[in-house]
């Protein structure tokens, strides 16, 4: 009878991947270390799902986000679908800018 095949121990592989990722995104890693001092696992529930640490996003437009390390990332998550129009869609940002310029009372009733 052949031995059972299982997942095996991937401890070394995971450590190597974490080290490689930390080298790829050192600024995000440093921000995560700092965030861990103030928040549980360094952030909100969604951020805690990304191991060993999440990219720290500094800007977003359309389907793309840019992290603290300057990497452009395609955002497949899109805020659990809340950003179906993408990040900062002009149809929304232009309307909000007009509302602010005209002094609309947002959330007044």
Image (cartoon, rainbow, N blue to C red):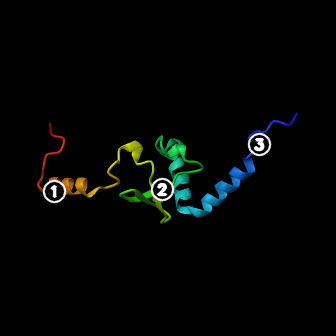
Mark positioned earlier in the residue sequence (1 or 3): 3
The quadrant where residue 60 appears: bottom left
Residue 82: x, y in percent?
A: 35, 44
Asked if residue 76 is positioned above or below residue 8 in the image, the reply reads below
Q: Residues within 10 Å of mark 3 (few under 14, many from 20)?
A: few
Q: Is residue 93 found left or right of 19 in the rendered image? A: left
Task: Using the image as rendered, state which of residue 30 and residue 96 is in the foreground.
Answer: 96
Q: Residues within 10 Å of mark 1 (few under 14, many from 20)?
A: few
The residue indicated by pointer 2 is 56
Which element carries disc 2, helix, strand or loop? loop
The quadrant where residue 6 appears: top right
Q: Is residue 39 found left or right of 88 in the rendered image? A: right
Mark positioned earlier in the residue sequence (3 or 2): 3
Q: Is residue 105 found left or right of 65 in the rendered image? A: left
Which element carries disc 1, helix, strand or loop? helix
The residue indicated by pointer 3 is 8
Q: Count the marks: how many?
A: 3
Q: Residues within 10 Å of mark 2 (few under 14, many from 20)?
A: some
The residue at the point 35 percent across, 54 percent down is: 87
Asked if residue 19 is positioned above or below residue 38 in the image, the reply reads below
Tell me the mark number nearer the camera, choosing from 1 and 3.
Answer: 3
Residue 13: x, y in percent?
A: 72, 52
The residue indicated by pointer 1 is 98
Q: CA distance from mark 2 to mark 1?
A: 30 Å
Residue 47: x, y in percent?
A: 49, 46
Q: Is residue 50 found left or right of 11 in the rendered image? A: left
Q: CA distance from mark 3 to mark 2?
A: 32 Å
- Residue extending furthest top? 1
Mark positioned earlier in the residue sequence (2 or 1): 2
Task: Using the image as rendered, state which of residue 63 and residue 32 is in the foreground.
Answer: 63
């Amino acid at each position: 009878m052949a031995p059972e095949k299982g997942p095996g121990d991937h401890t070394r592989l995971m450590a190597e991947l974490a080290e490689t990722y930390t080298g790829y995104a050192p600024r995000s890693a440093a921000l995560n270390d700092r965030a861990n001092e103030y928040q549980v696992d360094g952030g909100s529930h969604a951020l805690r799902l990304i191991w060993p640490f999440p990219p720290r996003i500094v800007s977003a437009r359309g389907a793309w986000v840019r992290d603290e390390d300057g990497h452009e990332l395609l955002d497949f998550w899109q805020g659990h679908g809340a950003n179906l129009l993408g990040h900062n869609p002009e149809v929304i940002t232009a309307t909000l800018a007009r509302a602010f310029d005209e002094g609309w009372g947002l959330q007044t009733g």
